[in-house]
Each structure stands twice: as C-alpha cells, then as structure tokens.
Amino acid sequence: MSIESYNRDILRAEGLIPSPGLRFRLTAGQRMLPSFFIIGVQKGGTTAMSEYLSEHPQLVRPQRKDVYFFNNVENYAKGMRWYQMHFAHPLYCMAKQWRTGTKVKATFDATPNYFAAPGAAEKLHRHFPDAKLVLLLRNPVQRAWSNWRMNRRHGFEPLGFDEALRAEDQRIAAEDAFAAAHGTHSYVRQRLGYKTNGIYIHFLREWQQYFPANRFFIRTTEEMEADTARVYNELTDFLGLDRYTGVKFIHHNKGGESERMTESTLAELSAFFAPHNLALESLLGRGLGWDALS
C-alpha cells in the first residue's frame, strides 16, 4: 500500500467541522475574543477540560471547540474577523449572567492542534501576546495509540497502527511538500503524526521562545484523571477565576478499548520517546511518571 494511502478530502473533515452560519459572520466584530488558550495536546483530555471550564459561571464557551486558526494556513489567511465569529456575542454573556447571577469574565479557544503546529506559537503571540496557555500532556505512547484509534473511527487512517508508524515520516514529508507547493494545510501532519506530535520537548521549546514560563499551565493527563478536582482548582486559580464546585466531572470523548497495541510496539514506542521525555522532565524540573511501560 502506498504511503499516500490517505484521502486528502477525508482528512479535511469538512463534514465534521461545520462553518458558523450567517448571523455569526454578520456579528463577528461584536463578539468576544479569548484571553486564554487550551493549546494541547490532541487526545490529552482537552475536550473534558474545555467542558469543565464551560460550566464555570465566569466563563463562556466558544461557539465550538477546535477553531483551527493559528495552526491552519488556510484559516489564518481568512483573518481575525473570521476568527472572532467563532466566539460568544455579548448578548449571550448577558443571558448567562442573568441565569447564574455571576459576571462573565472571559472566553477561551480550545484547539489542541496548536501545540504541535509549526509557526502557531508565533502567530498566536502576534495577536495575543499576553495570553495564558493551558497544556495537558499525555504519555506520548498512549497518545499515539489513542490518536490512531480516533483516526480509524473517523475514516482518516486506512493503515494498521504498525504500518502507519512506519509510513509516518515519509507521509509527513510528502504532504508538507504538497502543502507548501499548493498553499494548503497539511492535515497529514495534524492528524497522522503519531510519533511526531508526541515529541513534546520540541514544541514546548518553540512556544517558550514567545511566552514566558509564568504564562503556561502544564499538567499531565494522568494527573487530571487521578485528581480532576485538584487540577481544575489549580487551573481556575491560574486563570484568576473564583473556585467553583458545581462542575460534574464526567468522561468526555472517550473511545472504546476493544483492541490494544502489541507488546513489541509498546516497547518500541517507549524506547523511542524515552530520551525526549527525559529532556522534557529536565526542562519542566519535575518527573512526569511515564517511565513504566503502560
């Protein structure tokens, strides 16, 4: 099977990501802009965290999770008015304030693909230099497996896991060249980068060129799953919000567990990520608990 065994039209997933309607476009200039961003990682718990934050009375959810603006050259070229139409109108905020009796303070953009997208950090900093950044990092071995399983469900990935891992570097190189030649976005890099998108140290160093350390809230997915309430409270403290105890911490965007990767692939990926994880721990100044095979 050719490494170009994916379908570009399917990878664009236009049916899964509907465009906002006319009323959003007409009122774009009146809408809120985000003050913080959940930038990653894909399959790291960002859907759950964005849902939990949306329940906070001082926050209003965006019109949809995954705006895909700073990571996508085609969307970025549409400009800030296109971006702004994805967020809440002041009338919506007033309605929420009336329901809750609490003043809405902020909204947010939750697009986990920002973290691993080349150039996204510079673009986001250009428009929001004072932004706060939320980053949930999952064991990259399990993130890669979960990413592949999601892609299979959506029809993005025709290859088996081991085949996809072997084809990854060639696929990304070929699609990056195609995207550069045609001025399009590389959905292969975004969706099929199982190993590439798990080398977190590479991406974090790029983001830290634009944002100081005190602008980041970084936790692991495993920490969030072990004590969701604690991580949530730490995050709302970081965002300058009142603590809120009314959140229902339920699972979001959870896939089934009908199959598992082979032990040999697990060992291979663990060895691949080990030096990158050690470098990340050194940069963060703390252990991440990803040493054991899991």
Image: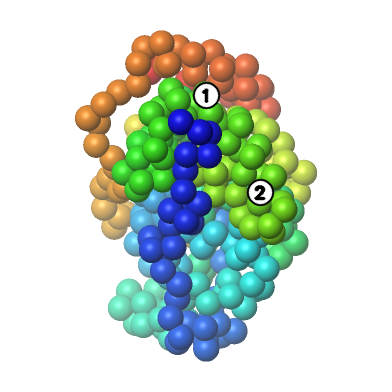
- The residue to which callout 1 is attached is 166
- Crowd tier of the residue under label 1, counting other residues whose Cα lies within 10 Å: few below 14, some 14–19, many 20 or above: few
Q: Residue at coordinates 64% horizontally, 57% vertically from top-left?
A: 184
Please name the amino acid that badge 1 sits on: Arg
Is residue 40 visible in the rendered image? The answer is no
Please name the amino acid that badge 2 sits on: Phe
C-alpha separation, residue under disc 2 versus residue under disc 1: 20 Å
- Crowd tier of the residue under label 2, counting other residues whose Cα lies within 10 Å: few below 14, some 14–19, many 20 or above: some
Above or below residue 65? Residue 218 is above
Residue 157 image-quadrant placement: top left
Q: Earlier in the sequence, mark 2 or mark 1?
A: 1
Q: Element at badge 2?
A: helix
Name the one closer to the observer, 40 or 74: 74
Q: Residue at coordinates 44% horizontally, 63% vertically from top-left?
A: 14
Above or below residue 215? Residue 97 is below
- The residue to which callout 2 is attached is 178
Residue 242 location in percent, x, y?
Answer: 45, 59
Number of dots carrying numbers? 2
Which tag is nearer the camera, tag 2 or tag 1? 2
Name the one closer to the observer, 216 or 123: 123
Q: Residue at coordinates 66% horizontally, 37% vertically from top-left?
A: 173
| Residue 216, label in figure | none
Is residue 78 visible in the rendered image? The answer is yes
Residue 258 location in percent, x, y?
Answer: 22, 30
Residue 97 location in percent, x, y?
Answer: 38, 78
